[in-house]
C-alpha cells in the first residue's frame, strides 16, 4: 500500500505544478483506478503478451470518431488487445491525417475487415447544426471534409421529398450521408494510389463495413446504401 502511494505521489508530482489549482485527492483517486485497472488487465492478459509483443495482427481496421464513448473493443464484443487497428479523428473522417495509418494497416497488417464507424450524437457533426459559438477549427474541419456536403445533400433530398423530420432523425440522416461520403473518399483514394487494395475491397477479399453506432439504443447497423434506402440492417439483432 505504501509503495502504491509513493508511485502515485511520484506521478502526481508532474501534474501538480504550483501555477495550477488542482485537486490532488481527486487526481489520486483517478490514478488509483488507472493502476487498479492495469493490474486487472495484467493479471488476465497472461501468455498473450508474448504474442502481441512480436507484432501486430489485427483482424479489423477501423476509421472512427475520437469520441470517448466509442470504444470499439467493447462494442465489437471485447475482441481483445491487438485485435483492432483504430484510426481516429474528429468525426471519423478520411482526411490527410488519417491516410498514413490507414494505408500502413492495409498494406502491411492485412486486416480482414475495414470498418468505417460513425455514431449518433457526434460532437463533430453537431457543429454543422448550430449557430452558437463553437470551435471554428472543428466546424471548418467538418465542413471541408465532407460534413458540409452531407448536410447539403440531405437538405436537398428532404426539400425534394417535402419531408420534415425530427431534429434527431435529421441529424442522424446527415451523419449517415457523411459516412457514405467518407467511404467514397476512401475508395477513390485507394483506386488512384493503391489499385490492388481497392480491387480486393470491391471484390470482397476484404469486407467493407460502414456502420453507425446508436448511442441512445446501443445498437449498430450497416449504413443504408443511399438516402433513398429505408432499410437498416442491424448487426446485433
Image (tube, helix red, strand yellow):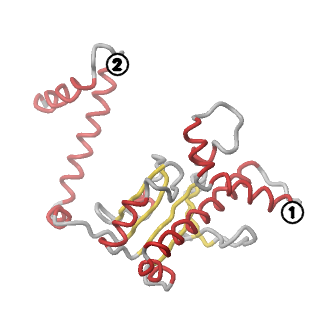
Q: Is residue 60 above or below residue 123?
A: below
Nearer the observer, 103 or 14: 103
- Could you say where residue 186 lies in the image, as x and y percent from the top left? 51, 67
Identified at 20% across, 66% down, the residue is 55
Q: Give the total number of marks visible in the rendering.
A: 2
- Could you say where residue 100 lies in the image, as x and y percent from the top left? 38, 60
Answer few, some or many: residues within 10 Å of disc 2's Cα (few below 14, many 20 plus, some between 14 and 19): few
Apparent side of residue 79 relative to residue 202 in the rendered image (left or right): left
Q: Which mark is residue 40?
A: none
User: What residue is shown with label 2?
Assistant: 22
Instruction: Classify residue 27 by image quadrant.
Output: top left
Q: CA distance from mark 1 to mark 2?
A: 55 Å
Quadrant location of the C terminus in the rendered image? bottom right
Nearer the observer, 85 or 119: 85
Q: Secondary structure at mark 2?
A: loop
- Could you say where residue 71 lies in the image, as x and y percent from the top left? 43, 54
Tags 1 and 2 in contact by the CB under 8 Å rule? no
User: What residue is shown with label 1?
Assistant: 160
The extreme right residue here reads 162
Answer few, some or many: residues within 10 Å of disc 1's Cα (few below 14, many 20 plus, some between 14 and 19): few
Mark found first going from the N terminus, 1 or 2:
2
Nearer the observer, 208 or 192: 192
- Could you say where residue 11 lies in the image, as x and y percent from the top left? 20, 30
The extreme front residue here reads 192
Amino acid at each position: 500500500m505504501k509503495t502504491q502511494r509513493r508511485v502515485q505521489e511520484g506521478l502526481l508530482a508532474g501534474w501538480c505544478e504550483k501555477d495550477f489549482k488542482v485537486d490532488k485527492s481527486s487526481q489520486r483517486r483517478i490514478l488509483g483506478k488507472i493502476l487498479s485497472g492495469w493490474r486487472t488487465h495484467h493479471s488476465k492478459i497472461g501468455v498473450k503478451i508474448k504474442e502481441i509483443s512480436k507484432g501486430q495482427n489485427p483482424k479489423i481496421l477501423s476509421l472512427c470518431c475520437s469520441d470517448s464513448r466509442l470504444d470499439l473493443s467493447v462494442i465489437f464484443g471485447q475482441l481483445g488487445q491487438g485485435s483492432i487497428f483504430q484510426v481516429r479523428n474528429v468525426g471519423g473522417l478520411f482526411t490527410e491525417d488519417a491516410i498514413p495509418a490507414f494505408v500502413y494497416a492495409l498494406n502491411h497488417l492485412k486486416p480482414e475487415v475495414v470498418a468505417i464507424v460513425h455514431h449518433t450524437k457526434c460532437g463533430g457533426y453537431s457543429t454543422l447544426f448550430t449557430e452558437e459559438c463553437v470551435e471554428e477549427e472543428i466546424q471548418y474541419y467538418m465542413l471541408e471534409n465532407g460534413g458540409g456536403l452531407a448536410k447539403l445533400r440531405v437538405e436537398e433530398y428532404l426539400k425534394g421529398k417535402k419531408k420534415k423530420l425530427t431534429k434527431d432523425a435529421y441529424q442522424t440522416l446527415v451523419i449517415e450521408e457523411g459516412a457514405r461520403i467518407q467511404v467514397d473518399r476512401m475508395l477513390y483514394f485507394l483506386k488512384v494510389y493503391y489499385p490492388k487494395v481497392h480491387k480486393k475491397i470491391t471484390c470482397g477479399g476484404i469486407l467493407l463495413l460502414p456502420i453507425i453506432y446508436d448511442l441512445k439504443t446501443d445498437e449498430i447497423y450497416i449504413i443504408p446504401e443511399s438516402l433513398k434506402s429505408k432499410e437498416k440492417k442491424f448487426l446485433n439483432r
